[in-house]
Image (cartoon, helix red, strand yellow):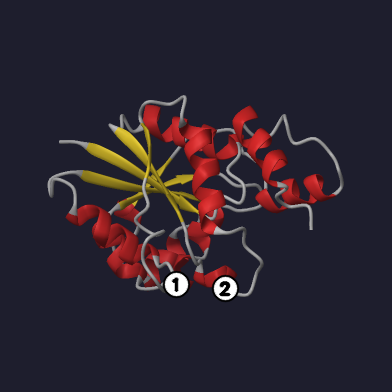
Amino acid sequence: MERIGVLGGTFDPPHNGHLAIAQNALTQLDLAQVVFAPTHLPPHKIHNHITPIEHRVEMVRRAIAPFPRFVLSRVDVDRAGPTYTVDTLKILRAGWDQAAEIFFIMGLDSLANLLTWHQPEKIIALCKLAVFARPGFDADLDPLESRLPGLRARVVFLQSAPLDIAASDLQMRVRAGLSIAQFVPESVAAYIAAQGLYRA
């Protein structure tokens, strides 16, 4: 049975933390591939300034190019309206072998807020949640399980060093004229510079 990871996000910009998380999941879960799905219009950031989607898609394409088992999906790019994870998973699963096991890769902070997501009960019916550590969050599943029965059996914790790279911090570094070379792939840093992203 094929096992596929899905990593969604704004990727504004994609950084080395995203790549490390995907590689961790690939290895620990023995995945055939990790699908990167840039979010077109994230509901929780609907009032934030977000870099135009085609810039973010191109940065993801460049970031994952050296990794043969990382795949870019436009599932959330070429459709209108807010991007809900449950819809993303439905569309992706419809195009894959129905026997495939799907892992949605997320941070512990996202798991802690899962009840605020759109139709969380359908999300855990569509996939397992591959969860990695985030600083400042713990893994107490009892409160979530009481509100979302069956959740515990759908969660897999990944062993990883806590990664504390925030895309918003990288944007601020660019605006301040500081280097982000140590945080993003060289191809992404070059694209950001060439396009003048995050300057304003």
Q: Secondary structure at mark 1?
A: loop
Q: Look at the image and tell me whether residue 165 can be seen.
A: no
Residue at 57% x, 52% y is: 138
Residue 193: quarter of image? top right
Residue at 35% x, 29% y is: 69
Residue 1: quarter of image? top left
Residue at 38% x, 31% y is: 26
The kind of residue on which mark 2 rests is: Ile
User: The C terminus is located in which quarter?
Assistant: bottom right
Name the side, left or right, on which 33 lies relative to 62.
left
Q: Look at the image and tell me whether residue 175 can be seen.
A: yes
Q: Which mark is residue 82?
A: 1
Foreground: 89 or 163?
89
Q: Is there a contact, CB below 8 Å, between mark 2 and mark 1? A: yes
Q: Earlier in the sequence, mark 2 or mark 1?
A: 2
Q: Which mark is residue 46?
A: 2
Q: Secondary structure at mark 2?
A: loop
Residue 164's place in the image compared with 64, above or below, is below
- Residue 163 placement (x, y as % from top left): 63, 39
Q: Which mark is residue 187?
A: none
Foreground: 177 or 150?
177
